[in-house]
Image: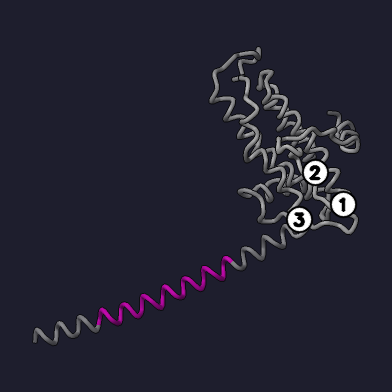
Amino acid sequence: MTFITILLAVIAYILWKIYRQREDEKEEIASEKFDIEWEKKKREEYKDYPYIYGKLIGNWDQVFADFHKKGMSLLKLSFHLMLGESVKIDYSEGSMKWDSLWDASKELLEHLEKYHEGSIAEHEIALTAYWQVAATEIGDLIKASPNTGSLSSGAHTSPISGEKLEVAPFTDIEKIASLFPKKANHPAHEISFFDEKGNFPRESKGSAHIDAKIKALGL
């Protein structure tokens, strides 16, 4: 009797394992199907932004695409992201490099418009995502330094050494152009923000074309 009981228990366990395996397979298939449908839905939702969808850190591609859909100026947002931290950096090599990155950003936008595929909206989304990350990083660097209290508002201010801006995520501005295929009229060499000695960011004259757009925004 004991043997039969044990045998029945073993059979029951085997049947349960088979059942559980099949249920797990069903759940896995359902999950994969859900993921596929979800991705399909998202790609359709952001079909106007094919070059950046799923390629930016986090989900900034979707966040700023939604801002654009609502009529928000991403160029204006980028400017405010830059300016919001710029006023907190006391005069230092870091403050000069931060300003140079903004000039480089304007030059990049004009370059993308002239020589790369993608809409102006996509270009601005990619750049705004860059400034979102850069502003967060510089903000953390400022807070990690002694507060000089140079602003009447009481905001945490501090000088920043230039070398702090010579690494990622600040140097990631170099990656933006690679998101967008080159047009036939693209120059032989891709735009770079390192000078011939490897210094970052290189000196940039910015862009009169983008400056005109910024002025039109009332900035």
| Nearer the camera: disc 2 or disc 1 | 1
Over which residues does the magenta segment extend? 12-35
Residue at coordinates 75% horizontally, 28% vertically from top-left?
99
**Does the segment drawn in magenta span residue 189?**
no
Q: Considering depth in this image, is 171 or 29 the residue closer to the camera?
A: 171
* Disc 3 and disc 1 in contact, CB within 8 angstroms: no
Q: Secondary structure at mark 3?
A: loop
Helix, strand or loop for the magenta stretch, by majority: helix
In the image, what residue type sits under mark 1? Pro
Residue at mark 2 to residue at mark 3: CA–CA distance: 15 Å
User: Callout 2, which amino acid?
Assistant: Gly
State how far apart marks 3 and 1 are (Cα).
Answer: 24 Å
Distance from disc 2 to disc 1, alpha carbons, whole Å, reads 33 Å
Q: x, y (%) of residue 48? A: 78, 57
Q: Is residue 134 left or right of residue 102?
A: left
How crowded is the residue under tag 2: few (<14 C-alpha within 10 Å), some, or many (20+)? few
Mark 2 and mark 1 in contact? Answer it, CB < 8 Å.
no
Which image quadrant for residue 155?
A: top right
Q: Which residue is mark 3?
A: 49
Of the image marks 2 and 3, the number of the one nearer the N terminus: 3
61 horizontally vs 137: left or right: right
What is the secondary structure assignment of the residue under circle 1? loop
Which is more N-terminal, label 1 or label 2? Answer: 2
* Residue beneath disc 1: 187
Q: Which residue is mark 2?
A: 71
Q: Identify which residue, 106 or 184, lies in the foreground.
A: 184
